[in-house]
Amino acid sequence: MSGRLWFFKRWRPRSLQARQLLAASVGLVAFLAIAGYALDAAFADTARANLQERLKNYARAYAAGIDFTRDRSLYIREQPPDPRFDTPGSGLYLQVVMPEGKGNSLSAEGPMLPTAGLLAPRQEVFEGPLPMIQIDGSPGAVYRYGWGLVWDADADPATEFPYTIYVMEDSRALGAQLRVFRGRVWFWMGGAGLILLMLQTVILQWSLRPMRRVITELTKVQRGETERMSERHPRELEPLTDSINAFIESERENLERQRNTLADLAHSLKTPLAVLRTQLDSGAHDQDLREEFDVQLRRMNNLVSYQLARAASSGHKLFSAPLPIESNAEEIVRGLEKVYAGKGVLCEFDIDAAARFHGEPGDLQELLGNLLENAFKWANRRVLLTARPLPAPGARRPGLVLSVDDDGPGIAPEDIAKVLQRGVRGDERVQGHGIGLSIVQDLIKDYRGELQVKRSPELGGARFEVQLPPGP
């Protein structure tokens, strides 16, 4: 059993091209074999039919020239229809069987022909090949046609007697025809088979070229030479290449999301850590220090839980309880005022009592924390947080307009797009990671909102305005 398994494993095709070429070759060979067999059988039947018709015509010709004497001796008046009838052992024989005996052509003198009997009047038979002995003693075979007749020359029933004409031909003549035909048929069919196999190989290579191109492009993607597969593929391969591209994009997005999540987490933990460092450096009392440590540790724990949940869900809940703006902002501002205590920045609130954030608490913390920290970093003395509801038609829940202003240097219009890119800082001399505003953009995009950066009309610095659309 192991030897058989090894054989099949060894000879099993290793590629689609080999499999298809093997299957097509087997099919082509089988077709040619069946076609050759059919042609051979058809030609053999036709040759036998022609032989029968020819022998029948000989018998008809002899019947027209045969006479019998009064003692019923055979007498042939006409010349034989074929000179071979007069040549001993020529392969073409005549035999006339009568009740009292039989008569032969000259060609039948010498060979031992098969035994023949009388046939009924108008009975016809075609037999063969029948064994015989050639004139030289060697074995042979003949095809025989027989025709039963009645002699009634005087129209006297008393003088009537039956007789049968047999015409025989050596089977070697028919065999020679069949051999010639078979040789030519298999020669031409073999040649046609070789041509078809070569043509089939060329067609198969051409038809599998798109598959090889897919493999080549996939190899380039694996090596990092290209980012995705091209879209120039046959319709049958488009679902495959589209799925591969979608998988590549998904993996790339997942990797990017994981990197961003780690960067966002590090950025989010920066402020609580800075608050703790400030408290330690300020020489605060133990009780105050413990309270601040407790607050910031809880905040860091919430930030870690939020970022992990956000990475797992890759989005936000569509239906969430409304969150107040002011209470969440106060907690963030208290920490930032400690971090930037040296600048003496004052943060003011202008928050409508009806303003609510409909989303995840962690999203609101991230949104406010990054916008306020950016404002504290660039402000000279003042920061303004404004929040008001965005009216919604009908019974839909209201949206939210949230803006953070500072009295710093502001941002030039041509630098806005660059500042909003992940990892880009507005001023390389200012400490930071350059991802806070990118986090803000990602959050706003998740909520289908819009971020606008312009100059603050109240404080003269930069204004970051967030508009979150009404909900369902």
Image: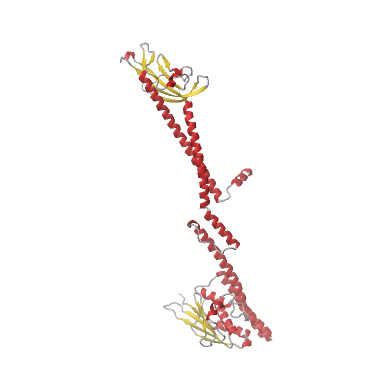
Q: Relative to 3, is 414 above or below?
A: below
Examine the rendering and report whether any part of residue 360 can be seen. no
Question: In the image, what residue occupies the spot 59% across and 72% down?
Answer: 261
Tell me residue 441's x, y (percent).
Answer: 54, 76
On screen, residue 138 versus residue 393, left or right, reads right
Q: Relative to 67, is 275 above or below?
A: below
Tell me residue 20's x, y (percent).
Answer: 53, 48
In the image, 194 versus 243, the foreground residue is: 194
In the image, 108 versus 301, the foreground residue is: 108
In the image, 288 versus 188, the foreground residue is: 188
> Which residue is situated farthest in the left direction here?
155
Image quadrant for the C terminus?
bottom left
How was this image coloured? secondary structure
Count of numbered tags? 0
Question: In the image, what residue occupies the spot 48% across and 57% down?
Answer: 235
Q: Relative to 470, is 380 above or below?
A: below
Question: In the image, what residue occupies the spot 44% across and 25% down?
Answer: 127
Tell me residue 419's x, y (percent).
Answer: 56, 78
Image quadrant for the N terminus?
top right
Instruction: Tell me which corner region of the image, top left, top right, bottom left or bottom right, holds residue 396.
Output: bottom left
On screen, residue 472 versus residue 340, left or right, reads left
Examine the rendering and report whether any part of residue 184 can be seen. yes
Tell me residue 471's x, y (percent).
Answer: 46, 76
On screen, residue 153 versus residue 92, left or right, reads left
